Amino acid sequence: MTAQVAARSVPRVRDDVRVRRYRGRLLVAGPVDAYELTESAEFVFRRIDGRRTAGDIGALLAQEYDIAAAVAGQDVLDLLGELTVHQIIELD
């Protein structure tokens, strides 16, 4: 199950989320579970600032990893949907 996220959605990390680096990976812990992020998911997570839209973050991902903008954009929407469902982020 994922939340519906639009390119114009503005994600922000919830105040109750804890972030730690463990064995070279970024761990994010919400009120229920903790998640280990991949390198590209960490790239996306680190750009969630409450100002950038999902589309903005997708464009940055495409540029950083030299992938098609449409692919990067969809990957960001999918990840943000999962992070929303798992109470790691909220969308404005």
Image (tube, rainbow, N blue to C red):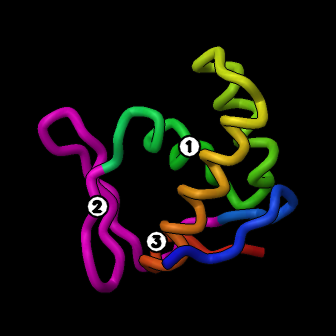
Residue 82 location in percent, x, y? 50, 67
Q: Which residue is mark 2?
A: 35
Which kind of residue does numbered mark 2 sit on?
Answer: Tyr
Q: Is tag 1's residue or tag 3's residue first in the polypeptide sequence?
A: 1
Residue at image mark 3 = 88
Label 2, secondary structure: give it.
strand
Q: Gap in Å between the C-alphas at discs 2 and 3? A: 9 Å
Q: Is residue 32 magenta?
A: yes
Residue occupying image coordinates x 74% and y 53%: 54
| Closest to the observer, 15 or 37 | 37
User: According to the image, label 1 marks what residue?
Assistant: 44
Instruction: Kindly report the secondary structure that dominates the magenta region of the rendered protein.
Output: strand
Which of 12/54 is in front?
54
Q: Is residue 31 above or below residue 53?
A: below
Residue 91 part of the magenta segment:
no
Q: How many marks?
A: 3
Query: Helix, strand or loop at disc 1?
Result: helix
Q: Amino acid at mark 1?
A: Val
Which range of residues does the magenta coloring cover?
12-36
Image position, residue 18 (x, y; %):
33, 66
Dots 2, 1 in contact, CB < 8 A: no
Badge 3 marks a residue whose secondary structure is: loop
Q: Give the spatial CA distance, label 2 vs label 1.
A: 14 Å
